[in-house]
Image: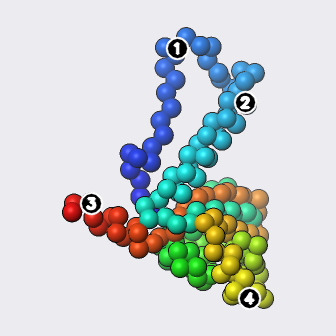
Amino acid sequence: DGDMSTNDTCILFANGLAGNTPINAQHPEAATFREALRRVTQYLAIEMARDGEGATKLMTVQVRGARDKADAVKAARAITVSPLWQCALAGGDPNWGRIVAALGASGCELDQNAYDIFIGNVQVTQQGMAANYQQEEARAAMAGSEVTISVDLHLGDGQATAWGCDLTHGYIDENTLYTR
């Protein structure tokens, strides 16, 4: 939902008390450590999204072709936390206009005549316009418990991936029953 709590926190400590040799950027194991840390934190991010309150679908949003990495991150995050898109995902409604609205609200550079959007393997927009696809195919791509949204902005080399979940009645139920 885009909100954060202490339950969504990961803290790493390296105070030297273990007496191990510090791993700095020049250490022969630095790349191995970096990759292991990336994999663990990515796994935790995915599991937090999968375990969202009331969630029934894990959403992976892949953005490429952004002006730069910062724009790609903005775009991917905006889609994953868009309540309109999260509800569409929950209902299996391939309303790609919700994705475009999130892109527009993200603050990333966007050429309205350039972007392509895929829901699963189904291309729903091409060069900013509705692609030639069948609604049933797009609905089928949204039917599983994991759904991938791919966006190509065609503006540069920036890319990013973000994870989120759908927004269901279960989310509302869980968040309105805390004090009952």
- Can you tell which mark lies on residue 134? 4
Q: Amino acid at mark 4?
A: Gln
Q: Say whether residue 146 is visible.
A: yes
Q: Residue at x 55, y 61 (%)?
A: 164
Q: Amino acid at mark 2?
A: Thr
Q: Residue at x 74, y 88 (%)?
A: 134
Looking at marks 1 and 3 on the same chain, the residue that comes earlier in the sequence is marked by 1
Q: Nearer the viewer, residue 22 or 90?
A: 90
On the image, which quarter does residue 178 sit in?
Answer: bottom left
Looking at marks 4 and 2 on the same chain, the residue that comes earlier in the sequence is marked by 2
Mark 3–mark 4 Cα distance, whole angstroms, equals 42 Å
What is the number of callouts on the image? 4
Q: Which residue is mark 2?
A: 32
Looking at marks 3 and 2 on the same chain, the residue that comes earlier in the sequence is marked by 2
Q: Which residue is mark 1?
A: 18
Expressed as whole percent of the image width and height from the top left, the position of residue 58 reads 58, 62
For residue 50, above or below residue 85 = above
Q: Which residue is mark 3?
A: 178
Q: Say whether residue 116 is visible.
A: no
Mark 3 is surrounded, within 10 Å at the Cα level, by few (under 14), some (14 to 19) or many (20 or more) other residues, namely few
Q: Nearer the viewer, residue 62 or 72?
A: 62
Q: Quadrant of the N terminus?
A: bottom left
